Amino acid sequence: MRHKLVRIIGGLALAALVAGSAAACAKDDAGTAACDLKFGFFGGVTGDNAGLVTPMRNASALAIDQYNATNPACKVTLVEFDSQGSPDKAGGLATSAVGDTAMVAMIGPAFSGESEVANPIFETAGLPAITPSATRPSLSDKNLKIFHRGVGNDLSQGPAAGRYIKSVLNATKVFAVDDQSAYGAGLVDEVKKALGAVVVGTDKVSEKQTDFAAVVTKVTTSGAAVVYFGGYTAEGSLFLKQLRAGGFTGQFVAGDGLYDANMLSVTGTADVEGTIVTCPCAPPSAAKGTFAADYKAKYGADPGAYSDVSYDITNVFLDGVKAGKKTRADLLAFLTTYNKAGPASGVTYKWEANGELDPSQVLVWAFEAKNGAWVPKQEIPKS
């Protein structure tokens, strides 16, 4: 009974927050000036996977700083919602976000698991969201008007990884491992479909797992020359180190969940060298305009994975603000007709009705760990 009462009270609280937000939007629609707006950034800016998320947060902050410098009369503030990459934290953070009536746009969530929890809350409040990096395909199957994805999903990344493993690595035996996350399991499913009988073994690991001895034994006895891993750096790094210690000398391939600086530094050059990761994103070093130079000037480092995408989608929302779209409803409507190339990636951002990026704009790259850096190998052909 108590749990039922808590759910009822929680539902009433969320309804009140949404009603307050709608009232604020109605006031803006009536002619009240709507400035000092807020954009949210939702993702794990601290925790095990901060190395992947921080460059995205930084890029969004850079875009907003540049906008504010030339629009001092109507500034935008970036508010961080630090999920630490955990779906368990996503519900409370999303509820907090929609309860702030000045919050008109959301960049993120960065990961698929937290997106599954947060997006329905954003939908109830009509808060438009564009993720720079959450790639689970089913996120666009929920009939959510607020959802938009700034990159391709794993229906593009998974088959591309499979093509790379078959055609470039010429692998005949692959062992596939996933971390059971919404992202990792979904990505590995697509890779297995692409590889078919080439997959000679599979296994699963779990979040926070530190002992991979049993999986290592399965890999080494399978005869596989390639291991494909779907998951994030916290587990992927330890798994790879233990694979190497267990005698595996073959190729390690993974998805974009490992495409971050921490994977390189934590694993160490000896073990990570030669690792291949795929990403539905272009090399940040190939970014157009002054983005890379501006990013390095502000943060003292080169831009990382998805930073160009995060910069671009932040500018999509800022384009809406410049066009006078200063409520959630107006910005959401603005996205339905948006059709413009991003200043950093050069990708043309236009979305299908389900929030997926136009397929003609989707690309997938392979990167290699080399001398302590992720080096672009090639764009993987679409077929």
Image (cartoon, helix red, strand yellow):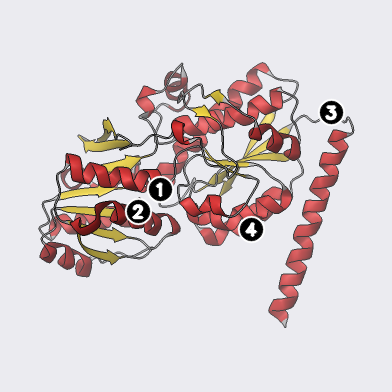
Q: Where residue 154 sits: x, y (%)?
A: 40, 48
Q: Which mark is residue 92?
A: 4
Tell which of 343 and 56 is nearer to you: 343
Residues at marks 1 and 4, CA–CA distance in whole angstroms: 27 Å
- Packing grade of label 3 (10 A; few <14, some 14-19, many >=20) is few
**What amino acid is labelled 3 in the image?**
Ala
Q: Nearer the viewer, mark 2 or mark 3?
A: 2
Q: Which residue lies furthest to the bottom in this view?
A: 1
Q: Earlier in the sequence, mark 1 or mark 4?
A: 4
User: Could you give the CA–CA distance between mark 2 and mark 3, rounded to whole angstroms?
Assistant: 48 Å
Nearest the viewer among 206 and 159 is 159
* Cα distance between the residues tagged 4 and 2: 31 Å
Give the number of the mark in front: 1 or 3. Answer: 1
For marks 1 and 3, give the CA distance: 41 Å
The structure residue drawn at horizontal position 36% and vertical position 65%, both measured from the top left corner, is 206
Q: Residue 328's x, y, as percent?
A: 73, 39
Res. 156 image quadrant: top left
Q: Do the residues labelled 1 and 2 touch (CB within 8 Å)?
A: yes
Q: Which of marks 1 and 2 is nearer the N terminus?
A: 1
Q: Where is residue 341 in the image (x, y as percent from the top left)?
A: 52, 23
Q: Which label number is shown at residue 33?
A: 3
Q: Are marks 4 and 2 in contact (CB under 8 Å)?
A: no
Question: Which residue matches tag 2?
Answer: 190
- Residue type at tag 2: Glu
Residue at image position (74%, 35%) is 330
Q: What element carries label 3?
A: loop
Q: What amino acid does circle 1 point to?
A: Asp
**In this image, 262 relative to 133: left or right?**
left
The Cα–Cα distance between marks 1 and 2, rounded to whole angstroms, is 7 Å
